[in-house]
Image (cartoon, rainbow, N blue to C red):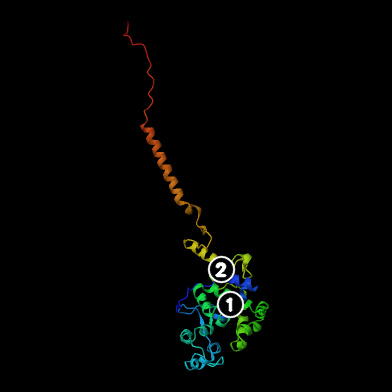
Amino acid sequence: MILAASLTRLSQPGVVAACNVLAVPVARIRAVLKVEAAGSGFDKKGRVLILFEPHVFWRCLPPGLRGQAQQRGLAYPKWGTRKYPADSYPLLLKAIDLHPEAAFKACSYGLPQILGENHKAAGYASAQAMFEVFRDKGEDEHVAAMARFIRSNPQMHAALKRGDMAAFASRYNGPGYRKNQYDTRLIKAESYYAKDPWRGMAYDAPTPASMPSGKTRAGKTQADLEREAKTQAGAAIGAAPVATTGTVAATPKSTAPWYVTHAPAIGTGLLLAIVAVLLIIRARRSQASERAPVIESSPVLPAGA
């Protein structure tokens, strides 16, 4: 089983596409992603972020296998029985050996932490297919799946649109959402992103026409301002300006005096002028001089002749 992911990170166009599907502001979508996965769909080992849920594995297993799974420490009937381990992959791999379909259904995946049981609502034929697409296509796919999943549940979608985080969390995270304070964490996270929905992202901004929210001063996003700052810094130290995708980097304007900026051109002009003068002088010296005309006169005769 291949576990290494593509590590393709979330882009602003990917977020905007999800916002357009759900008709919610960028700050709200980013709040959900921050609370669910702390802003990353991959773990420290470069794998899709997963959480293996033993109580879900229990209910997804055929009854005849539940006792065996419980003996192996893979399943129990009630949520909250034990603490989750730091790494869920060892449990997933052991569960796959016992029952692959139930094992993939028992994990939540990626940025939105969608449970494998919900693979159809997210747009996939199986839980394993969802895991593999998340692994291969990256975080934009994670967010697209989240948008499909939320939209498939009208009550959950309506709660998110009106900003009722308790009603949303009760459907997205389950009835035990209060134990982990999902609703209050979502509210705080949205407040965090409200001032600048793109904070922490260094990707090209979408066009204003497709941007539900997130503009900063002068209609520019935080990413625009960060790129401008990098360009100005590059000009100050004489570096090449930073170019964004689909644009041509502009040459930074120099703040030096005109005679310093144009010194090479001035020096070249003076040198050419000196050479021209020397050539003219040399030509004049080598030219044949014009002699005085010869005057024909009568021969001088001796005196008394």
Q: Residue beneath label 2, please?
A: 223
Q: Is residue 193 visible?
A: no
| Nearer the camera: disc 2 or disc 1 | 1
Q: Is residue 39 above or below residue 234?
A: below
Quarter of the image with the N terminus is bottom left
Q: Is residue 83 above or below residue 205?
A: below
Front residue of 33 and 128: 128
Front residue of 171 and 185: 171
Residue at coordinates 63% horizontally, 65% vertically from top-left?
209
Q: Is residue 283 above or below residue 140?
A: above
Q: Is residue 85 above or below residue 132?
A: below
* Left or right: 138 as drawn, with respect to 181: left
Quarter of the image with the C terminus is top left
Residue at coordinates 58% horizontally, 78% vertically from top-left?
120
The part of the image, by quadrant, that contains residue 160 is bottom right
Tell which residue pokes out farthest to the left in this image.
Answer: 302
Looking at the image, is mark 2 or mark 1 earlier in the sequence? 1
- Report the disc number at residue 39: none
Q: Residue beneath label 1, please?
A: 122
The crowd level at tag 2 (other Cα within 10 Å; few <14, some 14-19, many 20+) is: many
SS for dot 1: helix
Front residue of 133 and 288: 133
SS for dot 2: helix
Q: Position of residue 25 (x, y in %)?
A: 64, 73
Q: Position of residue 252 (x, y in %)?
A: 51, 59
What amino acid does circle 2 point to?
Answer: Ala
Front residue of 56 and 11: 56
Q: Position of residue 159 (x, y in %)?
A: 67, 80
The crowd level at tag 1 (other Cα within 10 Å; few <14, some 14-19, many 20+) is: many
In whole angstroms, how far apart are the C-alphas of marks 2 and 1? 30 Å
What amino acid does circle 1 point to?
Answer: Ala
Q: Position of residue 281 (x, y in %)?
A: 39, 36
